[in-house]
Image (cartoon, rainbow, N blue to C red):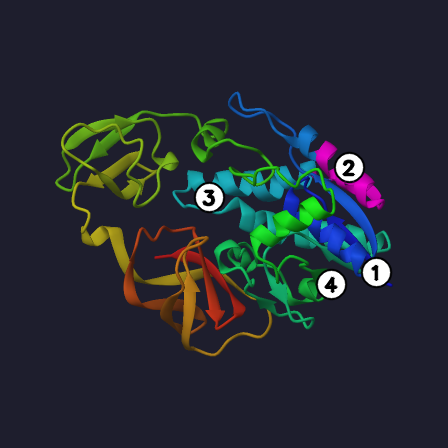
Amino acid sequence: MPTVYVGLSGGVDSSVSAALLKQQGYNVVGVYMKNWTADVAGVACPWKIDLADARAAAAVLDISFKVFDFQDQYREKVVEAMVAEYAAGRTPNPDVLCNQEIKFKLFLELALADGADYIATGHYAKTDGNGRLLRAYDDAKDQTYFLYRVTGEALKRTIFPVGEIEKPEVRRLAATFNLPAATKPDSQGICFVGEVGIRPFLEQYIPPVSGHIIDKAGHVVGTHSGAAYYTIGQRQGLGVGGDGPYYVTARDVATNTVTITDNPDDLQLSGDEFKLDDPHWINDTPPPGDYLVRLRHRGELVPMSLEDNHNTWSVRLHTSQRAIAAGQSAVIYDGETVLGGGFIAF
């Protein structure tokens, strides 16, 4: 049987993935990707716990175990790139960058060079064996939004063992296999960094600088500590007096100004058209036409029209959507198939 290197994060999904592959007869090797080890803003990085849990899962399953150290590459390709985007006034997603640069590039390359035939992860997604990415059976846990920048060639070498299973069944299987992560909570926060919010993380790299919060008329109504920390549609942490609630309608990192409104129906909070910056198509370039788009993880699938204007791709939504922010990913679907997508630009 082929050899599969499974990315063991220490969590339940990857542990069950390894167990299922072994049950199916594959030669399974567990690999912990050591991407980040630093504590951030007083929050301990869980890497030692995760490593111990991954090693314990490998021991229970009686499979080989390795550690791949990608700390330098993760810092450069994911963290520095994410910070640069926030500093420029955009809203990136670190999980998208991690999958593109680390899990399905560096991990895949090193695994193949080390003797693997395939890699596997605990993502809730499916492939058809020919490099196409498909939505997971459990739509509530579907993670294809984070995977749209993976290449078709990488997907031909990738297995997603839990893509056909609902999350409660994954938990049940973990208990059946006596895996230590059976009751471990799902991770939150930034990919590999731990339970730390994006703002305290960014403050380690983008120093707080006081600026004005203004209303739509340009009147100063409050202060903030850095426009880069905010995103369009945000309503928490504004600290503005009055009746509220207030919503961020714009942020200008050049002037360090955040603009807000108390009108939930403000036209600046919604939009129906944007461009795709740095588009990536998993397989063939799709023809212009009508598809579905997801603008955030677990966001609804919105009907849209994809247009190609002299090699500049644009999206026209059939219904206006709230809080569309530059730098976020727009992921395009043709039914169950993920075509690709790009970063939102205006």
**N-term-proximal mark, 3 vs 1:** 1
- Are discs 3 and 2 less than 8 Å apart at CB? no
Q: Amino acid under label 1?
A: Gly
- Horizontal and vertical percent position of residue 51: 72, 34
Hey, what amino acid is under mark 2?
A: Arg
Cα–Cα span, label 4 and label 3 = 31 Å
Residue occupying the point 58% across, 75% down: 284
Above or below residue 269? Residue 156 is below
Relative to 178, is 46 on the left or the right?
left
Quarter holding the C terminus? bottom left
- Return the x and y of residue 165 as percentages of the image width and height: 61, 59
Residue 129 higher or lower than 6, as above or below: below
> Mark on residue 157?
4
SS class of the residue under badge 1?
loop
- The mark closer to the camera, 3 or 2, is 2
Residue annotated with mark 3 = 85
In percent of the image, x 85 and y 44: which residue is there? 62
* Precedes in sequence: disc 3 or disc 2: 2
